[in-house]
Amino acid sequence: MTIPVPPQVYDHGLGAFTAEELDTLERYCDGLMLTKGTLNGLDDGSKYNDAIRITQIASIRQVPEIIWFYERLADIVRGLNNRSYQFDLRGFSEPPQFMIYRDAEGGHFDWHMDTGPQPPRKLSLTLQLSDPAQYEGCQLQFNTGTSIVAAPRNRGVAIAFPSYMMHRVSPITSGTRKAIVAWVTGPNFK
């Protein structure tokens, strides 16, 4: 396995998503059926632990009205991977997730890695849907091994990072934060 590398940012200024596209995507996601976010691999076999994670989630399935989102996401992943990681990637083996963190619920997701089903997740991506003025706290942070790095919060920014990198979403203190996360898989690291 390689050593952790800093997350890479793909800003809307670089052509990720326009404000109108983000509005369309957010409206679509707001209409999805939300469920409580779960955890994998807890020792006691449970799916929930509010000390670790409180968030509402919904899977974003490939449907005609948002196929453009999947295509754009694939382009972003391809560009960031080619520029920064050069991982052997095979595609999305699970749908992206829409996530909502609310202050009334104490939304957060403590330190974790994006381990998941086989084939292994190799590259994780977070797309910021909320304007940073809509919430306080709820920072996406990374542990690079030598420091804690906070991701940019501007609306439309896409942050890619190796799925094995320790990261968290700090507790939200006011408002609501919306984001989309996706994972790209590939063969095991050698």
Image (cartoon, grey):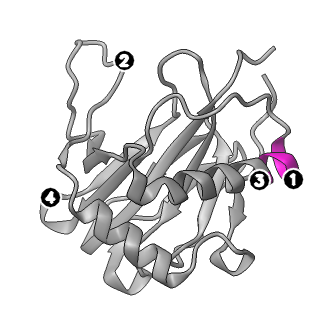
Residue type at mark 2 is Gly
Q: Nearer the viewer, residue 148 or 46?
A: 46
Residue type at mark 4 is Glu
Most common SS among magenta residues:
helix
Tell me which numbered mark, 4 or 1, is placed earlier along the sequence: 1
Q: Does 78 sit above or below residue 94?
A: below
The secondary element bearing badge 1 is classed as: helix
Q: Is residue 112 left or right of residue 97?
A: right
- The answer, for residue 163, to whether it is visible in the render is yes
- The answer, for residue 150, to whether it is visible in the render is no
Residue 48 lies, in percent from the top left, at 20, 30
In magenta, the rendered stretch is 79-85
Which residue extends farthest left? Answer: 104
**Mark 4 — residue?**
105
Q: Is residue 106 left or right of residue 41?
A: left
Tell me which numbered mark, 4 or 2, is placed earlier along the sequence: 2
Q: Nearer the viewer, residue 161 or 88?
A: 88
CB-based contact (under 8 Å), mark 1 and mark 2: no
Q: Is residue 48 left or right of residue 125?
A: left
Residue type at mark 1 is Arg
**Mark 3 — residue?**
80
Q: Is residue 83 magenta?
A: yes
Residue 75 lies, in percent from the top left, at 70, 54
Distance from the alpha carbon under mark 2 to that under mark 3? 29 Å
Q: Is residue 158 magenta?
A: no
Tell me which numbered mark, 2 or 3, is placed earlier along the sequence: 2
Which numbered marker is on residue 83? 1
Q: Quadrant of the C terminus?
A: top right
Distance from the alpha carbon under mark 4 to that under mark 2? 23 Å
Which of discs 3 and 4 lies nearer the camera? The answer is 3
